Amino acid sequence: MKSATGAHTGTGTWLLQRATALVLAAALPGLMIHFLTARPVNFLAWQTLFAPLWVRVLGLLAMTALALHAWVGMRDIFMDYVRPTGLRLALYLGVIIILAGSVAWMAAVLWSAT
Amino acid sequence: MKFRIYRYHPESGERPHMQDVGLDIDPAGKMLLDALLAIKAEDETLSLRRSCREGVCGSDAVNVNGKNRLACITPLTELKEPIEVRPLPGLPVIRDLIVDMEPFYKQYRSIKPWLINDEPEPEVERLQSPEDRARLDGAYECILCACCTTACPSYWWNPDTFVGPAGLLQAYRFIADSRDEATAARLDNLEDPYRLYRCRGIMSCVDACPKGLNPTEAIGRIKSLLVKRRV
């Protein structure tokens, strides 16, 4: 039986989207509770919220999961709506730069304040 | 009873339009197909497909009040007037309620809907255990009416690359068959960003299927097999 297609990439990205969804479902409630119970009113209180290492690690983990999750979603949208290859590649690149940049920026912010 | 029927005659040069039709018919115990045939008896230019008139051949699938159904097993008493009858969405219309099924069949063919087994043929049938046979339940009953596939927005958008629920249900029917030897190749055939994974699990197919089958579940099982193979 000859294969009608040759991409063999569907399962990996599908799994990635599910896995990152699970990470987000697990990490976001914890972070929400952490912030809502503290309800910082000034910058100093806000900053101390990020002092524990686990908050920063969990925050960065959630951001990375969000970026990977969004990447699969954006890729699917471009596959559906953008047919010219050059334009699609350019959009892929733009999204990767924005998402990877956001993760790096968040890491820098989280670790620069302390 | 009041009907609104989609009319399109490409030879006339007119654009497709909805035609209001009144029909004197007692709905008790009658199906939509009975009404359509009665309308056709009055106006023979109305074109539709039908054959077995009992929900087995799958040729009279139409869109009724926004839902894909088989006209022959849709009771008139269930329908709100005016009863709007359109051809199946997402396939090219040939004339009136008749659509070109070729894009649908093309996807169906692409999953090789036949048993692949290169072993020498046994003297008797290729036997299955009752458990192996039970795995085909819910998959083999499909009559290929296309109600599910033409209710699927992913298929509307990617009819050339997404197999669609009917084709995927049949793909699973052969993957699950203990007598079939091409499981790995069948999974390879579906592992691609479009062919299987354009399914978003919205279950329009389940809602539409006049035989009560569940293509979404079959698609989930194919995904499980692909994941198992990978991890």
Image (cartoon, rainbow, N blue to C red):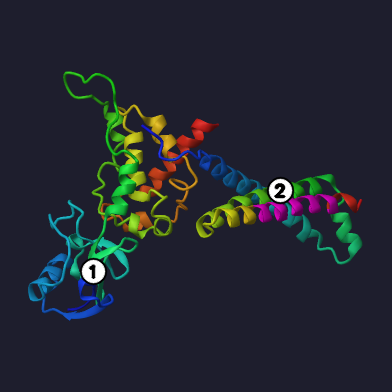
Q: Residue A89 versus residue A105: which sits nearer the camera?
A: A89
- State which quarter of the image contains the N terminus of chain B: bottom left
Question: Which residue is depicted at the point 31% across and 38% down?
Answer: B112
Query: Does the magenta run of residues contain A95?
Result: yes
Give the residue type at disc 1: Glu
Residue B3 position in % (x across, y down): 21, 77
Are tags 2 and 1 found on a single chain?
Answer: no
Question: Which of the labelled discs sits on residue A64, or is there none?
Answer: 2
First to last magenta residue range: A93-109
Question: Which residue is depicted at the point 32% across and 53% down?
Answer: B103
Q: Secondary structure at mark 1?
A: helix
Instruction: Identify the main secondary structure in magenta.
Output: helix
Whether the residues at callouts 2 and 1 have beta carbons within 8 Å, the answer is no
Q: Quadrant of residue A74?
A: bottom right
Of marks 2 and 1, the one in the foreground: 2
Question: Which of the labelled discs sits on residue B78, or is there none?
Answer: 1
Q: Residue B48 versus residue B214: which sits nearer the camera?
A: B48
Question: Which residue is depicted at the point 43% across and 59% down?
Answer: B157
Query: From what the image shows, is residue B24 above or below residue B88?
Result: below
